[in-house]
Image (tube, helix red, strand yellow):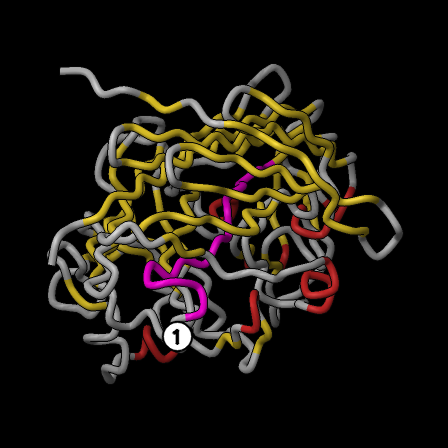
Amino acid sequence: MTTAIAHGSVTKSSFGKSADGTPVDKYTLTAGGAEADIITYGARLQALKTPDRDGKIDDIVLGHDDMSGYLADKSTYVGAIVGRYGNRIAHGAFTLDGKSYQIPKNNGENALHGGPIGFDAKVWQAHEIANGVELTLVSKDGEMGFPGTLTVHVRYTLSAHGKETVLRIDYHATTDKTTIVNVTNHAYFNLAGQASGSILNEIATLPADEYTPVDAGLIPTGIAKVAGTPFDFTKPTAIGARIGDDNHQLKYGGGYDHNWVLRGHNGELKTAAKMVDPVSGRVLTVTTTEPGVQFYTGNAIPAPLNGKGGAVYQKNAGYCLETQHYPDSPNHPDFPTTTLKPGETMHSTTIFTFTTQAK
């Protein structure tokens, strides 16, 4: 049995200018009844429109209508590609080949998402590809304290397969000096629609038997079983069912802001999450070649935050499923390595598949 693939279209338009006057472009990808908007500022997923069970189209990712919104939003990383090291590095410090490196701290005592000026704050080069767009960024040796000139390519493609919509992100990176790299997408999803309020009633399944508990600075302290804890989403569970439990891990994150250890081998495509919105009937399945996923429930959204189309975002207005290597991996030799050497290519794939289910 074969499913017809609906090839879409790609159009380019202007999205304004960055703070230094660099033009920012928007690429609109369409396939079937779906549409994705990618902007070159931070290589962001700016909008993603998909049908609900009744065929009603809505935008299901948080964001801003124009560049002024993104430039004013200093903390959410909404929709962006984050790096050079997505997630946290303890004290911003790590050692490679016997040499110590220091990344500027921008999250308490730690470095987050590559330091104060990460990939999210850059205007990427871009060009159209079949069914999508490829964005490229060159991060120079020493930028934010990281060694090596790193060249990163991120490809977004959108396709329709029968009643499925598939948004695929492919990452590639090379370096001229041994370095570390951990890039991911920081989209906030709300399957009921970006203006619909809380995501706490959505049903989450995370097929992971372990997670990485953290200290008060959200730095992993090791690997632990999810069984018997509020972090057990091996069976479908409402996001909000246990988010308020008297649990010190939840208190550290203000909710869920943790890395789940996925089943299967690093580099092989595996399921990271399945999310269901009972109201709209939208279903999101995330598959990835990465070893982990950071499930973040928008605990630190600076409410009120002005969003798209007059929407006002509050805490828990969206959640992130950041497919990744584990936080602070350079300081944990037992975690899958994030080291990249000259002559090697870092590549990973994450696929977001959207369907609907009946009531």
Q: x, y (%) of residue 126?
A: 69, 30
Determine which residue is flagged by label 1: 197
Local SS, label 1: loop
State which region is magenta. 180-195
Q: Nearer the viewer, residue 294 or 331?
A: 294
On screen, residue 41 versus residue 249, left or right, reads right
Does any portion of residue 221 appear in the rendered image? no
Q: Does 358 appear above or below 290? A: below
* Residue 142 belongs to the span the image colors magenta: no
Residue 69 falls in image quadrant: bottom right
- Which residue does the image show at 12% across and 53% down from the upper left? 358
Label 1 neighbour load within 10 Å: few <14, some 14-19, many 20+: some
- Which residue does the image show at 48% across and 53% down from the upper left? 187
Does any portion of residue 270 appear in the rendered image? yes
Q: x, y (%) of residue 216?
A: 45, 74
Residue 198 falls in image quadrant: bottom left
Q: Amino acid at mark 1?
A: Gly
Q: x, y (%) of residue 271?
A: 25, 39
* Residue 193 belongs to the span the image colors magenta: yes
Position of the C terminus, as image quadrant, is bottom left
On screen, residue 17 versus residue 173, left or right, reads right
- Which residue does the image show at 38% across and 67% down from the upper left? 297
* Residue projecting furthest to the bottom: 246
- Which residue does the image show at 13% across and 58% down from the upper left? 236
Q: Nearer the viewer, residue 148 or 240?
A: 240
Position of the N terminus, as image quadrant, is top left
Q: x, y (%) of residue 158?
A: 44, 32
On screen, residue 353 versus residue 45, left or right, reads left
